[in-house]
Image (spheres, rainbow, N blue to C red):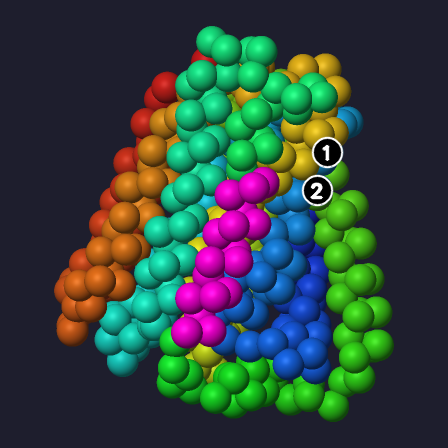
Amino acid sequence: MLLILGKFFCCSIIIFVSGKRVAKYGDVIAVKTGLGGLWVGMMLVAIATSLPEIFTGVGSTLFVDAPDLTFGNIFGANSYNLLNIAVLDFLHRPGPLLSVVSSGQLFLAYVSLIPLGIASAGILLGRLFPFFNFAHISFYSLLIAIAYVMCSRSVFLFEKRQPLKTPPERESNAYTGGLENITLPRAFLCYGAAALVIVGAGIWLAYLGDEMVSSFGLAQNFVGSLFLGFTTTLPEITVSVAALRIGAKELAVANMLGSNLFNMTILFFNDVLYRKAPIFTIVSPRHIFTACVVCIMTFFVISGITRKPKAKSAFGLSGYALGLIIVFVAGAFLNFVFNAR
């Protein structure tokens, strides 16, 4: 048991350090190519910090043959990302964090629920209607991929219509932390090198998750949602805290919400790779519970953006942040109760 936990800790450190470098150089690339604001957080940085989820999923489906680990990891990572917004709110001393972000974040939070809803429907109906597939790929996976493309385009168009409050170059240069002198080729090289490390760590993490299932007597969806979900979101929280410290509030929040949107497309890629059956026809219906937790937590974020509270409540947290923490802890406890065997 201690050996497995030790390996899990080492893998977490590797992902933590490499994920930070991937996101840092990813943002340098964004600066050099002229991107910025909400779009940087939602696309380039969010996708970069989601690399652990991608390759943990690849390892779970291709090498370990445990698609439930993939689903647990994705839904668990999304719940951790939303919990991290509560952490960011605590660190944002001037006041409630979501009260000062743009309306684009609200739009992003809403559209992140679309692929989540499709995945939930697939888990519920996949076993009942297994013939809904194309080329051995579930119909629901195809819908998730289409929804991601359409949602990303909608967010991009929405942001273009909004007046800029902060010049993108100011936010981006602050975020790169003095790295503006790095050339674009070097940024791509460092980005790629760190990404390759995350590829290996993600595959290793899938094997560790399978070892935990065997050694601890826990269900795959619980191990995926709690342990793997925590580890694979280390890059997200690292990057968002760094962004918040230099005042890039839009990027900090968009990184979390954008990761939640992108993470759902990982189910599509894993369905393509898993050739034994359409993936939605074989996964456990227990994942619905974690999906509901993510949905409830997302509505707390939406509430925080729309209501714009002016002051924090107890413990230096806003009301929506307390709600996020309570829902997450309750969900984790009930998940353990339902899935420990």
139 and 68: which is toward the camera: 139
Q: Residue at x 44, y 38 (%)?
A: 116
Q: Residue at x 44, y 70 (%)?
A: 159
- Tag 2's secondary structure? helix
Percent of width and height locating residue 290 = 40, 32
Point out which mark residue 59 bears: 1
Characterize the magenta stretch by its predominant secondary structure: helix
Write down the region rendered in magenta.
Answer: 145-161
Q: Is residue 251 above or below residue 165?
A: above
Q: Amino acid at mark 1?
A: Gly
Q: Do callouts 1 and 2 mark residues in contact (Cβ within 8 Å)? A: yes
Q: Is residue 190 above or below residue 180?
A: above
Point out which mark residue 222 bears: none
Q: Amino acid at mark 2?
A: Phe
Label 1 – label 2 distance at C-alpha: 6 Å
208 and 233: which is toward the camera: 233
Left or right of 93, for residue 146: right
338 and 308: which is toward the camera: 308
Percent of width and height locating residue 30 = 65, 75
Point out which mark residue 55 bears: 2
Q: Is residue 341 above or below residue 19?
A: above
Whether residue 336 appears in this view of the structure is: no
Percent of width and height locating residue 284 = 50, 17
Percent of width and height locating residue 321 = 27, 57
Left or right of 190, for residue 292: left
